[in-house]
Amino acid sequence: MEIAGLILDLDGTVYRGEEPVAGAPEFIRRLRREGVPFVYATNRANRAPEEIAARLSGYGIDSDPREVVTAALATALYLRPVGSVFVIGEAPLRQALAGAGFAEVAEDPDYVVVGLDRGVDYDKLNRAVHAIRRRARYVATNPDLLIDAGGGEEDIGNGTILAAITAATGVEPLVIGKPHAPLFEIALARLGVPPERREHVLVVGDNLDTDVRGGIRAGLRTAWMTTGVAQPDAGRGVRPDFRVNGYEELARLVFGPRTSVPG
């Protein structure tokens, strides 16, 4: 199989909890040695690319923040040309929007941008609802209802915040993150793969509903990595191009029928 580049999910694919997935550091080192382009794409909007790259480096995976496409960064890049924004979200989302030239305002914004915000309150929700009802464009970094909190627990995700705003306004947001197209388009631009070769880009992720479904929608090849949390009820009707049970199997797919991932 010809591979023009890879888009790698992070949580559950490259690392799980506080540990790298077995074989991930060796596989990524091999991508670098053999000159295979790759980027990381994550629905996270509350971690900056620099923070994620530092975390990867702590796992023995040398990383450049420019290789990390977060939902926050994708939102900022996708919404250009710039305007004013009211933000529900944490510092990395605000920083990404400010870095792209958006002005954050409390009233009458061009956009209401909603990301995971563990300090969300009645006032923030009310301001967002009022702005959307006055025709501000409603944008979501990702639709995730729940997020992995570690230890087998799940916490409220951004999708839960969105549900409240949508219920109050009757407006559905433009969603940037997986499984929607914008994050994949930004990741492809970072890879530098021309449109006519996009079918040779492989999306690798552990989530059928977001990674695989989104890759299929974007016209990319997909590999379901079964290293994440089991999803007995998820991904119905989603058919990845490949199913891989770990990095040795992924290496055979990407590099050919060699049997291991050398360090």
Image (spheres, grey):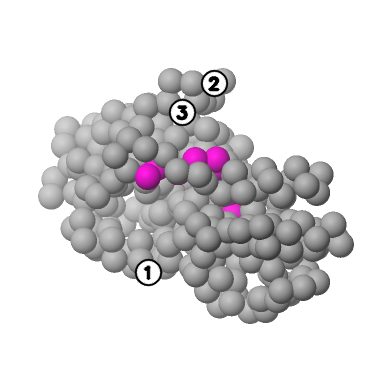
State if disc 1 and disc 3 touch (CB < 8 Å).
no
Q: How many marks?
A: 3
Which of the 4 image quarters holds residue 80? bottom right
Nearest to N terminus: mark 3 or mark 1: 1
State if disc 3 and disc 2 touch (CB < 8 Å).
no
**Which label sits in the foreground, 3 or 1?**
1
**Circle 2 SS class:** loop
**Circle 3 SS class:** loop
Question: Crowding at label 2, few (<14), some or many (≥20) Cα neighbours within 10 Å?
Answer: few
Nearest to N terminus: mark 2 or mark 1: 1
- Specify whether residue 113 is in view: no
Q: Which residue is mark 2?
A: 236
Residue 7 lies within the magenta run: no
Residue 148 lies within the magenta run: yes
Nearer to me, 126 or 211 = 126
- Specify whether residue 216 is in view: yes
Which numbered disc covers residue 50? 1
Q: Residue at x 29, y 39 (%)?
A: 151
Is residue 104 toward the left or the right of residue 56 in the image? Answer: right
Q: Position of residue 12 (x, y in %)?
A: 34, 41
Label 3 – label 1 distance at C-alpha: 32 Å
Q: Residue at x 66, y 57 (%)?
A: 122
Q: Residue at x 56, y 20 (%)?
A: 237
Nearer to me, 222 or 179 = 179
The magenta-colored residue range is 141-149
Outermost front residue: 122
Q: Position of residue 167 (x, y in %)?
A: 75, 42
Label 2 – label 3 distance at C-alpha: 15 Å
Q: Is residue 184 above or below residue 152?
A: below
Q: Which residue is mark 3?
A: 241
